[in-house]
Image (cartoon, rainbow, N blue to C red):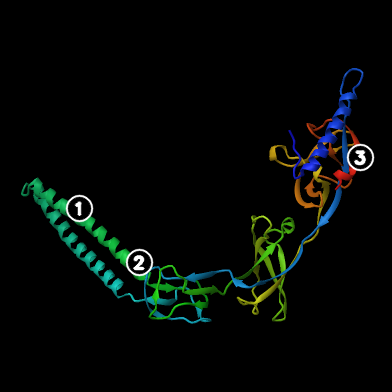
Amino acid sequence: MSKIIKIGLPLTVILFSAAMALSSCSDTARTPEGVQAPRPVLVVDAQSSQSGVSLTTSATVRARHRALLSFALPGRVAVRLVEVGQRVERGQLLARLEDTQFRHAKQGAQAASKEAVAQLDQLRRDLDRVRHLHKRQAASREELEKVSTAVLTLEARLGGAKVQVGEARRMLSDTRIVAPFAGVITYVGIEAGEYAQPGRGVIRLSGDQELEVEIELPESALSGVTQGSKVEVSLPILGVDGLKGHLRSISRGAEQGLLFSAIVALDAHEALLPGVTAQIRLHTDAVTGFSVPIAAILSPSGGDTYVYRVGKDSRVEKIPVVAIQLRSGAVRVEGALVHGDSIVVAGHANLSDGQEVDARELSSSPLHSELSR
């Protein structure tokens, strides 16, 4: 059974009364042969409408790639090599902890690994000799198994030693902060000699290749913009105009009553720097749609939405529509409609596609004032 969406209780009661009244007329109006007469329904004309998006807002330019860097290990800072405003390259060393113990651990692990390699090489040579002697029956089976077991044991020990070398290298690397990409240092929060906690951001790096701003869009603007929509950009404080950009991404979720976040990618320009104020002007061409009363929109079991259109043969046709925007009791929709189509607003309960109806203008009904609000 179809249900009417987005309608408050008072309007629901009104529509129920209208449906009951129209149904009563349909029940009593029968042909002599007992065939049900066309069902009475109330209709209104679909009104074409155009809507575009025009928005001006300000935001702070920022780098697309940004990072707040921290040490992965606790320790005392041995050296900090950068200052705020300094440009760095990818992989450049920015700061380092005191690493004596980690270098010693790495050297010890490497030494143990080399020793295991040397011992394993000797044992493998011994195993070859014992195998040769065993074939000539000059060595027992027990001697062969003993040397074979020693080789397997040392191979396992060598594997463990290689793991320790890798872990020692990783820990030594974790005493260093290096730039993950090229950019400019925008914050330094630690000095040489201070004790660093793991995970606490101490250096902020802002990439200098791609710039962007984050803006907020009202819900009413979502239907008129898409990823890639062009924007105009100016820097009012610097007196720079005529810059360009485009919407890189648009959030499709927001808490109730809040705006939707969108990221604007900015075309490169020498005046664009992280931290400057940019004015964003977003404008889209008007898109033609149709306005119908809320009461006309049906959605069975919360599924796809549609309306019933009355054709010239007095039969209804189910027209799928997409609700775009709610405006003062009417809904702007997109679908296969034309201006002036007769759209059913009452009497469509249990109506089926192709059913014959007796269409009556809503303006001639006592319910006109309530349903047209």
Q: Residue furthest right?
A: 364
> At x 87% / y 32%, what residue is drawn?
22
Q: Secondary structure at mark 2?
A: helix
Residue 271 relative to residue 319: left or right = left
Image location (x, y in percent) of residue 12? 79, 40
In which image quadrant can residue 192 be found? bottom left
303 in relation to 265, above or below: above
| Left/right of residue 361 with respect to residue 142 in the rendered view | right
Q: Which mark is residue 366?
A: 3
Residues at badges 1 and 3 in contact (C-beta under 8 Å)? no
On the image, the x and y values in percent for residue 48 come to: 86, 51
Mark 1, secondary structure of its residue: helix
Of the residues under marks 2 and 3, which one precedes in the sequence?
2
The residue nearer to you, when weighing 269 against 201, is 201
Q: CA distance from mark 2 to mark 3?
A: 81 Å
Q: Amino acid at mark 2?
A: Arg
Which amino acid type is shown beneath numbered disc 3? Pro
Which disc is residue 152 wearing? 1
Q: Is residue 102 above or below residue 371?
A: below
The quarter of the displayed image where residue 194 is located = bottom left
Q: Answer with mark 1 or mark 2, whichever residue precedes in sequence.
A: 1
Three-letter amino acid code at disc 1? Leu
Q: Mark 2 — residue?
A: 170
